[in-house]
Amino acid sequence: VMRYGTRVYVFEFKLDGSVEEALGQIKEKGYYRRYVVEGKEVWLVGVNFSSATRQVQEWKAERML
């Protein structure tokens, strides 16, 4: 979790997975809920790393309303 002003970014990282899995885990586990209740602008960020290239393979961000 990273706080920046009135925004909160909730990250989930996967290795050789998918950004959909990462975002799904954030939603399923409710990692973002406490920040929504606080009235913050919340962004969910899923990031997938490749073990072959050792780099970010894909990422996706979604704003929670």
Image (spheres, rainbow, N blue to C red):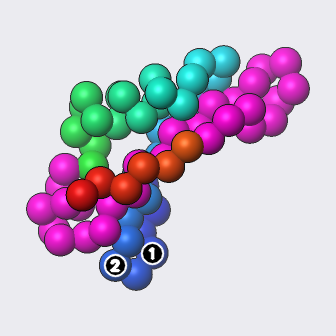
> Who's the residue at 59% across and 19% down the image?
17
Q: Which residues are magenta?
A: 33-59
Is residue 26 toward the left or the right of residue 53 in the image? left
Name the residue carrying label 1: 4
The front one of 12 and 23 is: 23
Dot label at residue 16: none
The quarter of the rendered structure image containing the C terminus is: bottom left
* Residue 56 at x, y percent in the picture: 74, 37
What secondary structure is found at the residue carrying circle 1? strand
Is residue 17 toward the left or the right of residue 43 in the image? right
Name the residue carrying label 2: 6
> Who's the residue at 27% across and 49% down the image?
32
Q: Which amino acid, mark 1?
A: Tyr
- Where 40 falls versus 51 (above or below)? below
Q: What is the CA distance from the residue labelled 1 to the residue labelled 2? A: 6 Å
Query: Which residue is outermost to the left?
Result: 37
- Where 55 falls versus 1 (above or below)? above
State yes or no: residue 44 in magenta: yes
Q: Which amino acid, mark 2?
A: Thr
State yes or no: residue 2 in magenta: no
What secondary structure is found at the residue carrying circle 2? loop
Quarter holding residue 13: top right
> Who's the residue at 22% across and 39% down the image?
30
Is residue 53 toward the left or the right of residue 5 in the image? right
- Where 4 falls versus 15 (above or below)? below
Quarter holding residue 40: bottom left
